[in-house]
Image (cartoon, rainbow, N blue to C red):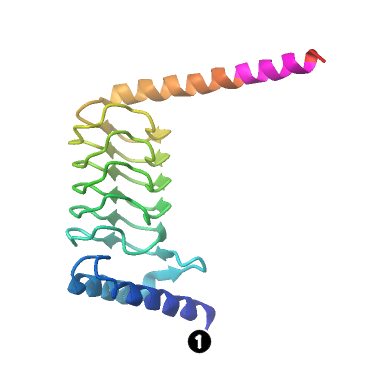
Amino acid sequence: MNKDQKLLEEAYQSIYESTLEPEYFGPPERKWKLFRQLHMMSGMVEVHEDGSVSVHGDIDFTHQQIFQLPYKFKEITGNFICMGNYLKSLEGAPEKVGGGFTCSSNQLSSLKGSPEVIEQYFDCSNNKITSLEGAPRIVKGDFWCRYNPNLTSLEGAPEFIGGVFDSKQFSDEDYRKFVKRRELDKRVSKELDKDFDVNVFNGF
C-alpha cells in the first residue's frame, strides 16, 4: 500500500467512525449515503496528510439534510453545492473553489469558514446572515446574498467581485462605493502610520 492509498484508507476509517456518532449527520442512512458518495469519488479524491480532502470535480450536497459539512475540504476544482440543508456553519468548506459555491437555503448567521477564492459565483441567499464578515476575499463571478433580512452592513464584503453584487438591502453600486471607501481608508491609515513612525524616529 503506497502513501496515498494509506491516507485514503485513514480518511475512510475516520468517516466510518463518524457514522457511528448518532447526531453527526442525522439518521444513519444519510451518514452511509455520504460515506458511499466519497468512496465512489475515490478516483477523483486526494487526501492530504492533515486529513483534508481535495476533489477534482463537482461536489453536490443539495437537500441531504445535513447539519454540518461531512469532511474538511481543501480545494474543489468544480462547483461546490450545499444548498437546502440545516447548516449553521461553513466549517470544513474548501479554501479554493474552481467553479461556483452555493450555500443558499440553510440556517447560516455567519459566513465564517467561506472559501478564500472562488473562480465563479458565490450564493448565500435565503439564510440568517447579519453581516458579510468571513465572506470570500475574491469572487470572480456574481455574489448573491438575497433574502437575508437581517443583513444590515457591507462590513466584511469581498475585496473583489468580478460580476454583480446582488442583495435586497444593498445594490451593486453600494458595494462598489463601499469597497472604494474601504481601500481609501486603508491607504490613509497606512500613510498616517508611516508619518507617525517618521515623527517618532525624528524625535530621538
* Picture quarter with the C terminus: top right
Q: Amino acid at mark 1?
A: Met
How packed mark 1 is, by other alpha carbons closer than 10 Å (few <14, some 14-19, many 20 or more), is few
Q: Of helix, strand and loop, which one carries label 1?
A: loop
Which residue is farthest front?
22
Residue at (39% x, 33% y) in the render: 156
6 falls in the magenta region: no
Q: Is 103 rendered above or below residue 38? A: above
Q: Give how far across and how far down residue 125 sits, in percent.
A: 21, 41
Relative to 49, residue 114 above or below: above
Point 27% across, 65% down: residue: 24
> Looking at the image, which residue sits at the far bottom?
1
Residue 142 in percent (x, y) is at 29, 38
Identify the residue shown where x is 33% and y is 28%: 154
In this view, the residue in front, 5 or 99, is 5
- Residue segment shown in magenta: 191-201
Please tell me in which quadrant of the rendered image residue 188 appears.
Answer: top right
Residue bearing mark 1? 1
| 192 to the left or right of 149 | right
Q: Quadrant of residue 109?
A: top left
Residue at (33, 40) in percent of width and height: 141
